[in-house]
Image (cartoon, rainbow, N blue to C red):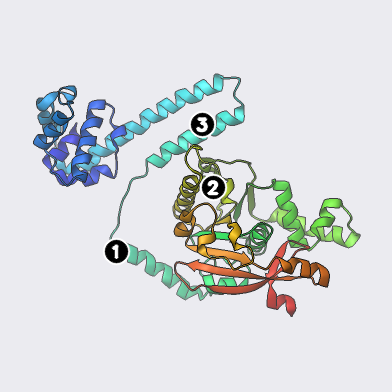
Amino acid sequence: MATLGAVLIRPDSLDIIVSIVRPSDFYRKTHALIFEAMLYLNNQSREVDVLTLTDYFESRKLLNGIGGISFLTSLSTHVPISANVEHYANIVKENSLRRQLIQISYENIEDSYNASVSLGTVLEDAERRIFQVAESKQSVSFQSAGDVVNDTFSLIEDRYQRKDHYTGIPTGIRELDNMLSGFQDSEFIVLGARPSVGKTALAVTMATNIAIHKTIPVGFFTLEMSAVALIQRFISSEGRVSSQKLRNGMMNMGDFKAVTAAASRIYDAPLWISDSPGMKLLDLRAQARRMCSKHAVRVIFIDYISLIGTEDSNIPRHEQIAETSRSLKALARELAIPVIVLSQLTRDTEGKRPVLANIRESGAIEQDADVVLFLHRERESFKDWQDSGNEVIETELIVAKQRNGPVGTIRIAFIPKYARFEELLAKEA
């Protein structure tokens, strides 16, 4: 009542309150209806006072249901000091969260007693509910340019002292790192290509360089293959042993020694893998947070976006992908790390270089991405490679979008035998 009454005394305090609470946070339905009315009037650029609220409820035949004019008038009498409105709103929010936690606890207890539900499902649902409450606790805020300048200058000064060419996380592909200055914190990065062009291979190559050779903690979500299949790719790429030999076991002693050495390096690397099939967006976000908090993960790869499930599967597919894209971009900012997401491209890219509009299923990915990378090569080149006996296929790595830097095309070498990418010049040398 003090929160609502403060708005009647100081209408501008509504801007403070709305960044903290929502109508559903009020315990009494009457209070929720009044707050909804205040928000409606404010959105219509109308004054919020007893008279306008009375008119609002009378027109909807709800005035008697909320207690009449006398109740609206009494709200302002419950305000000790209107300047403390933020404190009052925080009390409302805190008690709302406590009620939600109580309700969640009852649901978790009920699920725990239900023997027909697997323990894994019970734990997953419990975690999801808790994270939903934790996310709703975040409030909208702003800061002065002076505060931001201090933080920014400290970052620039640190770079000046270190004299490091790459300000972000180096991928191991020199030309790409020169163009991007490495993968930057808080950026949402999309890597797109048609099937079998090498999206996963490039992600594995980058993750190998980052986790094994730079010892920077990496999180890798593989929704398309198992963790064992993914590690086989890492071993093939790092050990330079044919993936076919790993599958059929036809290795010589030299191959087996290379596999053993690669497996040892990967074993010691700060690499964390999640391979849950059909993973929901909320679960992915929860696991990403745990990776960062428990293992100090500095970069996350997701293979790939179309396989991430949403809570509401009834909404159109492009809306599901748009929701996922927005959420992953928000995750990158929340965790302050680069998030690299793999994406398919539309069929009409066959035989021509891809453009931003070719990202499959949703234009939201194109809009949300801070950096968009495409892999491209002509289909004929794979047959040419087989016929010629060459070890590499020249492939274009296209920086199609970079919000804070240049775009362009880099030529790199794909080695199909190891499903690995390397710098073309380094290979030719």
Amino acid at circle 3: Ala
Q: Is residue 110 visible?
A: yes
Q: Which mark is residue 95?
A: none
The local crowd at label 2, few if under 14, some if 14 to 19, many if 20 or more residues have their Cα within 10 Å, is many
Q: Position of residue 257 (x, y in %)?
A: 85, 59
Q: In this figure, which residue is indicated by the disc labeled 1? A: 145
Amino acid carrying mark 1 in the image:
Ala
- In the rendered image, the quadrant that contains the N terminus is top left
Is residue 48 found left or right of 241 in the rendered image?
left
Q: Earlier in the sequence, mark 1 or mark 2?
A: 1
Q: Residue at x 73, y 47 (%)?
A: 228
Question: Callout 3: few (<14), some (14-19), or many (20+) C-alpha neighbours within 10 Å?
Answer: some
Indicate whether 207 appears above or below 226: below
Instruction: Decide if residue 26 is on the left or right side of residue 117.
Output: left
Secondary structure category for the residue under label 2: helix
**Amino acid type, residue under disc 2 in the picture:** Ala
Mark 3 and mark 2 residues within 8 Å of each other at the beta carbon? no
Estimate the x, y position of residue 81 in percent, counting from the top left: 14, 39
Q: Residue at x 12, y 33 (%)?
A: 55
Up-down relation of residue 214 to residue 123 (above or below): below
Viewer-proximal residue, 169 or 393?
393
How many other residues sit within 10 Å of disc 1, few (<14), some (14-19) or many (≥20)?
few
Q: Which residue is mark 2?
A: 288
Marks 3/2: CA distance? 17 Å
- Indicate which disc, 1 or 3, sits on the residue closer to the N terminus: 3
Q: Secondary structure at mark 1?
A: helix
Residue at image mark 3:
126
Secondary structure at badge 3 equals: helix
Q: Is residue 45 above or below residue 105?
A: below
